Image: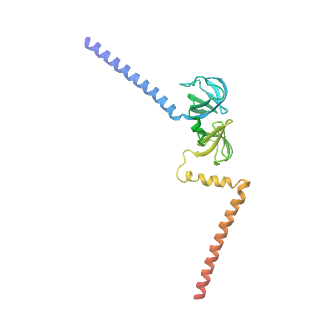
Amino acid sequence: MRQAAALTSIIRTATASAALAVLAACGGGGDSTAAATDKSFKGTVTSFDNAQSFSVDGIPVDASGANATAQGLSTGSRVEIEGEMVNGTIQARRVEFDDDSATDDSRSDPNELDGRVTAYNSPTSFSVDGIPVDASAAPMTLTVGMHVEIHGTISNGTMVASSVKIEGRSGDDASRSDDDRNDDNCTTSTAKSSCESEKDDDSEDHKDSHDDNDKDDDKSESKR
């Protein structure tokens, strides 16, 4: 009887340990996955309701689930937020004062926006996860639903892009980004003349080459 009781106790202990290990693994896996998808957003607090609800450069921030929130936050504070963009709102996991604002001001693209195209007007005007994007400096032909990664700065609720990358593309598709931008630029009135000039130059080069070939053929015929 004693041996049976001891065996039962061992089995219960092993079962409990295994259950705890599974729970720990699930909990740890969830946190690491969430942390892996977090992005960094830097900017100025433009409106402030409380430590859990405010806006940064016009973008709403929900910090109700943040692990750490800066104390003394107020309108005008420079902050750095780690979290993810959900339906146009930053779901913050961490909020702190931006102590490196002087360094960040010298960078052209302190913010990164990673998400799906939710609206598309033109190669220079579209929205990602509900956030308006001004891609005048990096035009890209996109379609709604595409997964993109954008680097730039946030200004008055708009992401001003310095670079736009289509996620999931590789090889020839990825290398076409510069060509796409040039083609898009040719649709603007200011660039049409230069694009047409380049086409005329190409046409002249082709014509000259064709004339040279004709001359060579004539010489060959005369020799015969």
Locate residue 97, reporting x and y percent: 57, 29
Q: Is residue 71 above or below residue 188?
A: above
Locate residue 47, reporting x and y percent: 68, 27
Total number of numbered labels? Answer: 0
Q: How is the image coloured?
A: rainbow
Towards the viewer: 79 or 24: 79
Image quarter in which the N terminus is found? top left
Q: At 58% across and 88% down in the image, what residue appears?
A: 223
Image quarter in which the C terminus is found? bottom right
Towards the viewer: 202 or 15: 202
Q: Is residue 91 above or below residue 184?
A: above
Q: Is residue 210 above or below residue 32?
A: below
Judge left or right: residue 203 versus residue 67: right
Q: At 59% across and 37% down in the image, what residue appears?
A: 102
Toward which corner of the image does residue 201 lie, by quadrant? Answer: bottom right
Locate residue 173, reporting x and y percent: 56, 52
Q: At 60% across and 46% down in the image, what residue appears?
A: 163
Q: Is residue 104 above or below residue 72?
A: below
* Residue situated furthest top in the rendering: 1
Locate residue 141, reporting x and y percent: 64, 49
Q: Is residue 113 visible?
A: no
Q: Is residue 201 visible?
A: yes
Q: At 36% across and 20% down in the image, what residue appears?
A: 15
